[in-house]
């Protein structure tokens, strides 16, 4: 597939702290597995875990990458994450500005999976 036609995706995940999110985000960007990460602190999560409803303060990370790298991003997140079962959701993008798409593709050309 022509890389300029490759779909962009978001990979959504959460972290227990801004420190962990920034460390993981920097590693993902340095390895060119993504062009950018957005880290949004201050989220409160309510969820089922081991038969009980839990509450946690979390940090959202949105990882902007190309579809072909989604599995490598998933693997890297799993490898670096402190959670036993982190949320890792790959979200296809319906439409993206052409210049932004070109930038995203260019910045992920040299991706290093390990």
Image (spheres, rainbow, N blue to C red):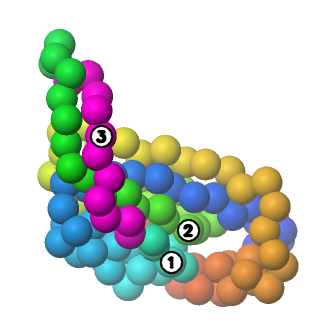
Is residue 70 toward the left or the right of residue 43 in the image? right
Q: Which mark is residue 45?
A: 3
Real-space Cα separation, disc 1 to disc 2, in angstroms: 5 Å
Pointer 3 or 2: first along the chain: 3
State the predominant SS element of the stretch in magenta: strand
Pointer 3 or 1: first along the chain: 1
How many numbered marks appear? 3
Q: Residue 64 carries which label?
A: 2
What span is colored magenta in the figure?
39-49
Tag 3, which secondary structure?
strand
Q: Is residue 88 above or below residue 108?
A: above
Real-space Cα separation, disc 3 to disc 2, in angstroms: 22 Å
Which residue position is annotated with label 1?
36
Do the CB atoms of the residues marked 1 and 2 lie less than 8 Å apart?
yes
Question: Can residue 109 be seen at all in this image of the molecule?
Answer: no
Tag 2, which secondary structure?
strand
Q: Quadrant of residue 83?
A: top left
Mark in front: 3 vs 1: 3
Residue visible at 19% across and 35% down? 55
Instruction: Indicate the position of residue 64 as horizontal and vertical percent values.
Output: 56, 68
Mark in front: 3 vs 2: 3
Residue visible at 51% across and 55% down? 11
Do the CB atoms of the residues marked 3 and 2 lie less than 8 Å apart?
no
Magenta stretch contains residue 90: no
Q: Few, some or many C-alpha atoms within 10 Å of disc 2 (few <14, some 14-19, many ≥20)?
A: many
Tag 1, which secondary structure?
strand
Instruction: Indicate the position of residue 18 as horizontal and vertical percent values.
Output: 22, 68
Q: Few, some or many C-alpha atoms within 10 Å of disc 3 (few <14, some 14-19, many ≥20)?
A: few
Question: Can residue 48 be seen at all in this image of the molecule?
Answer: yes
Q: Few, some or many C-alpha atoms within 10 Å of disc 1 (few <14, some 14-19, many ≥20)?
A: some
Pointer 1 or 2: first along the chain: 1
């Amino acid at each position: 597939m022509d890389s300029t036609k490759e779909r962009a995706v978001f990979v959504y995940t959460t972290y227990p702290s801004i420190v962990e999110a920034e460390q993981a985000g920097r590693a993902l960007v340095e390895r060119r597995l993504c062009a950018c990460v957005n880290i949004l602190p201050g989220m409160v999560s309510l969820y089922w875990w081991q038969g009980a409803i839990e509450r946690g303060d979390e940090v959202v990370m949105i990882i902007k990458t190309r579809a072909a790298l989604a599995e490598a991003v998933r693997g890297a997140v799993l490898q670096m994450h402190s959670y036993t079962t982190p949320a890792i959701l790959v979200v296809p993008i319906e439409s993206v500005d052409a210049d932004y798409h070109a930038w995203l593709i260019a910045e992920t050309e040299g991706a290093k999976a390990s």
